[in-house]
Structures are given as C-alpha cells and as structure tokens.
Image: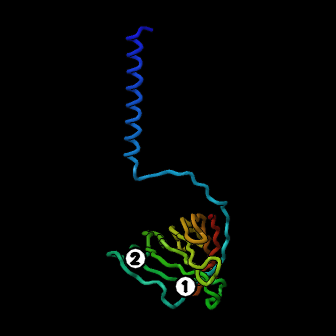
Amino acid sequence: MKDHQMGECLLFLVGVMVLSMAHSKADQNENWWSETVPYKMGTEKMTKLHFYFHDTGNPTAVKIAEAPGSNSSATRFGELYMTDDPLSEGPDPNSRLVVRAQGLYGTSGMNESSLIMGISLVFVGNKKFNGSTISVFTRNPITHKEREFAIVGGTGYFQYARGFITAKPYWANGKNATVEYSCTIVHY
C-alpha cells in the first residue's frame, strides 16, 4: 500500500472512531434520565389466602358521583362509589377482621350488572401481613355465581404481587350477602 493510501486509510479510521465516540456520547446524554443495572430478585413464592367479604346493612360504601341517567338505568350504569369494606377470616361477620377492601368501584355494565373495581386489600391485625396490600384492578360481573378478579400488584409482604381471586356467594338474603374470597398470589 502506498503512503498516501495508508494516510487516507488512517484518516478514515480516525473519522469513524470520532463519529462512533460522538454517537456514544450523544446516546449517554439522551438517556441521562434512565439507568439499567444488574438486578437479581429473590425466589418467588405463592401464598394462598381465604377470607369472607360481608355486605350488610351497615354502609361501608358510599356513592360519590353518578352520571346523568344512572337512576333510570336498569344496571345503574355510571355510578361511582368509595368503599372501605371489612373482610373476615370466617363467614360469621363477627369473626376476626383480617383485611379491609379500600378503594373505588363503578357500575360499568350498560346491559349487565357489573362493576369495574380499583381496590387495595389492606391487611390488618396479622403480624406476618400487617400493613401489606394487594392491589386489585378488575371487572366484577356481580350476577355471576363465580367470578375472578385480577391481582395487579402489592406492597410489603406482597411486593410485586400478581395472581387472581375467586369470589363466590356464600350466603345471600336480599341486599345482605357474604362472599367467599380465595386468593392465589405469586410474589417475592
């Protein structure tokens, strides 16, 4: 190779290196707000829980909004409620309180009675789970015999939770009811 060709080749390589470094620096500046680091999470575990929801004459859910026409809708479509419901370890409403279901639900079905629920199940009175939560965001077709709710997150003992809850009527009399909840939770 001749000297002038060698020089051109070196200039070309230096130019490529400079451009490469400039692009690398630009990428770093562009992504200054994010960082990916090696992370190894502990072993996942599965927890199964069983408790009962009680819907009694004592109002633990209050209507906070409604759409025009909700009152004339057969399904009460467009109503929004805030709730703080007790869930106990047994079907007797006087059994030990283990969870409070706190959040929002709205009547979401125009042609079928269903709810859309955004609820945190807050654990109380249990050393192992106390203060931990399970986050539920799901559709609840309330007239179905058996329903499944999606667990989309959690805190405390249930960090990174996912899973599902099956809900089925245990007892009902008019507007009063007890619903059995069985939870399958995968978490770290």
Nearest to the observer: residue 158 or residue 179: 158
Residue 27 coordinates in the image, percent (x, y): 40, 42
**Residue for point 51% across, 91% down:** 58
Decide if residue 88 is on the left or right side of residue 4. right
Q: Residue furthest front?
A: 3
**Which quadrant of the figure has residue 173?**
bottom right
* Number of on-image labels: 2
Q: Where in the figure is residue 46, as x and y percent of width and height?
A: 67, 65
> Horizontal placement of 62 versus 48: left or right?
left
Mark 1 or mark 2, earlier in chain = 1
Mark 2 is surrounded, within 10 Å at the Cα level, by few (under 14), some (14 to 19) or many (20 or more) other residues, namely many
Report whether residue 142 is seen: yes
Query: Residue at horizontal 56%, vertical 84%?
Result: 86
Residue 176 horizontal side relative to residue 7, left or right: right
Three-letter amino acid code at disc 2? Glu
Q: Quadrant of residue 167?
A: bottom right
> In this figure, which residue is indicated by the disc labeled 2?
79
Q: Residue furthest left?
A: 68
The kind of residue tagged 1 is: Asp
